[in-house]
Amino acid sequence: MSVATPPIETQRQAAPFRASHGGGPPFRLFGNDGEPEPWQPGRTPQRTYALGMMVGIGASSMFFLALVSASVVHRGLAQNAWMPFHLPSLLWLTSALAVASSSTLVRARRKFKAGDWQSFSRWWTITAVLGICFLSGQVLAWRQLVSQGVYLISNPSVSFFYVFTVAHGLHLLGGVIALFWISWRQSRGWRKSPGISRSTATSVAALYWHFVTVLWLFLFSFFLIGG
Amino acid sequence: MSAHAHSFHVSEAPTGFIRKYIFSIDHKVIGIQYFFLALTAVLVGVVLSVLMRIHLLWPAAKLPFIPNGIMTPAQYLALVTMHGTLMVFMVLTTAPQSGFGNYFLPIQIGAPDMAFPHLNMLSFWVTFVSFLCLISAFFVPDGAPISGWTAYTPLSGMGQISGPGEGWGQTMWIVSIAFFCLGSLLGALNFIATIIDMRAPGMSLFRMPLTCWGWFVTAILGLLAFGILLAGGVLLLLDRTAGTSFFLPAGLVVTDQLQPHSGGSPLLWQHLFWFFGHPEVYIAILPGMGVASHVLSTFCRKPIFGYKAMVIAMNAIGFLGFMVWGHHMFVSGMNPYSGFAFSIMTMAIGVPSAIKTFNWLSTLWGSKIHFDPPMLFALGFVSLFVSGGLSGIFLAQPAVDNLLHATYYVVAHFHLVMGVAAIFGIFAATYFWFPKMFGRMLNEKLGKIHFWFTFVGAYCIFMPMHFLGLVGGIRRYADYTAISYLQSMHPLTMFITFAAFVTAIAQLVFLFNFFWSLKRGPKAGKNPWNATSLEWITDSPPAHDNFGGQYPSVYRGPYEYSVPGAAQDYIPQNLEPSQVAREGRS
């Protein structure tokens, strides 16, 4: 092919070469804290883990949205059968624990960015422990209900409450496991691998943790307004 | 291969049998696993439908696979349930999206794999467990559930007492669906992340093949819809096992026993189910639309007509699909005003659907059509989608639907538009991509025989069903010999059953062709169809990392066929503009 020939124009004009990769991460708030990464074919970009988590949070939100609208519709369809009950007072304490765990996590991440590994690891563990306290609090709240004679099958209003709290508790349990997994890998020096980097793992776990906290606050206020 | 290709070596291919073929994280192997899962499911599903057709004609016939030989009405309903569930979930959702999507999405966008390969493996195995749970419903005491693939409450919520198959069978069914939801959610997450972040340099969203757009919109629908069904399934399972009353009202008396439940609403299940169920219809059909567009353009040797309009129409269909669930519930006693709103929204879907249809026809207009088997099936897809879709406009009227809802008219409608059309999309994809997946060509003659028998057969089965429905032929009845007004329809029913036999037998041609060509078919080169998208620049079958370390850059859209002035009638997406040969030069 001769050099002088102008390139052929296709029907959809070949736009100037534009790399779809190599820009800054779209989720700076939660994504990779490091420099924008150059495109590496064969690698999953680090920011994709944050994206995947956002998408997963979307799916999870749809699950809870379905339950919330089911309970709203249920109340509308079966008005006479819907019996309100007293929320366990313990839920105020667990809500405080949830908020506290999110703020300790913010602290941990700040220490991580500053490179202060020891403080990071301390705040990170405190967060996980607060998560466990939250879960124990929820179990005690269920016992409080049971001691009042309010069981899963007493009434749809109670059934929904149990479903919401158990589903949320399972989400939080997943978060606790993720936090411990990261600490464990951290303690072994985070062997280099083509997978998720240390910085991405902490930020993605934090993203999830904050989601679970916000989810709880949403559910709790839903109970307060609806209960 | 363009000079700007990026040379990289990702990871070594696994060598052990288990890591390579069973617990593989290679999207190509996972795609094939999904494909064979769907193939197994479709065979079971077809056998079930043939058994049902035989029973409808000869209610006293001794049948294979049926305990005691002669089918009871409850067993008939169990077959209806399992046929529907297998086909909708394990075939129509699994094959086009998880099967072909998994295999070809990363290759078509120039990526080495899905964004999260381990998650991908997990989603397949969760789906596999779901399949095992579903099949196990046949073998538990009292057999499979009788409540249909929609599992309407209260029938599905009360357990053993409400009928055979409503004990263990129904429980296994719900467990299976819950697993399926989880697997599909993980898959959808992976698809979305892959499309957003793993595209090769130059592969802008509007340069993706329409197949990728189909998978993308489907993944978004799946992500939003399967969580809803999962929530509904959890509540239903609690109603059955823990004694809650989400869907079960007070005062139910079953076989003279007052049920303990109180305060639930059966309608709530219908809302939750159909809020998932309608998007599910588009989950089944959108990948087929993508494949049909892709194949039509390739075998017309013409750019697809209105690429952007096609993309927008797909997104519009996906968006509107979430607002029409109520049209499945016109007979539930809903407020006529909401029925009216759902009716308007439903007919609105006709607009993007028509845009797609006219664009397909405009692509065909004035082109030199190559009638290879993939093209035949793509044309069949368009034909069936139109024939099945048109009856949807009638059914979208609440007044008409009230009359026809429980009849074969609806059965005919959704089988044509969602079932057979989507199956034709799957067949088009199979004939089109088989050379890439297995490195060998399918036999063309057998492919054409398969097409004509299936195409004519499908119309012979489902067109007469419209008439059967119009005269009041009620669906789900195991035996209509005692209904006097349907006796005159007996010859028609006989015709449908024989058409079903012939169509089912014609599938053996496909199976023979598939497995014979797997071993004996002529070797396929890299690009047997002279197509432009990225899967055709790599080996057949592709290397472990898809491009053998030479990752492509993309310079143009996916449908550059018959470009004026170009020497070849197709210009691959990765060819640098300066390297495109001109007419009359070497």
Image (cartoon, rainbow, N blue to C red):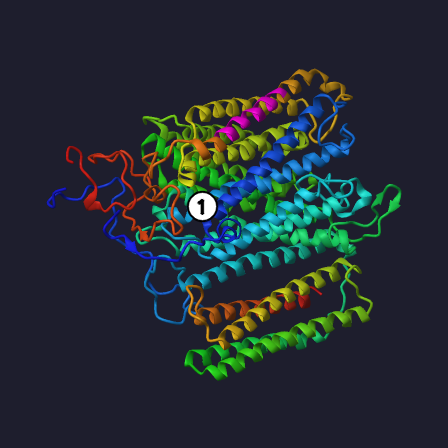
Q: Residue at x 15, y 32 (%)?
A: B584
Can residue B345 be seen here?
no
In the rendered structure, the residue with mark 1 lies on which chain? B
Q: Is residue B507 inside the magenta stretch?
A: yes
Residue range in magenta is B498-513
Q: Residue at x 35, y 47 (%)?
A: B206
- The one of B145 and B356 positioned closer to us in this rendering: B145
Can residue B518 be seen here?
yes
Kindly identify the amino acid type of the residue bearing the numbered disc 1: Tyr
Q: Position of residue B445 (x, y in %)?
A: 43, 23
- The one of B28 and B291 positioned closer to us in this rendering: B28
Q: Position of residue B60 (x, y in %)?
A: 77, 23
Q: Quadrant of the C terminus of chain B?
A: top left
B509 lies above or below A77: above
Q: Residue at x 31, y 33 (%)?
A: B302
Q: Is residue B278 inside the magenta stretch?
A: no
Q: Position of residue A3 (x, y in %)?
A: 12, 46
Viewed as shown, does residue A161 lie left or right of A2? Answer: right
Q: Position of residue B93 (x, y in %)?
A: 55, 43
Viewed as shown, does residue B258 lie left or right of B179? Answer: right
- The one of B522 and B7 positioned closer to us in this rendering: B522
Residue B79 placement: quadrant: top right
Residue B378 placement: quadrant: top left
Please identify the dominant SS of the magenta region.
Answer: helix
Q: Residue pushed farthest front? A: B16
Circle 1 packing at 10 Å, graded few (<14), some (14-19), many (20+), is: many
Q: Number of marks in the image?
A: 1
- The one of B396 and B256 positioned closer to us in this rendering: B256
Q: Secondary structure at mark 1?
A: helix
B499 lies above or below B275: above
B213 lies above or below B531: below
**Which residue is identified by label 1?**
B103
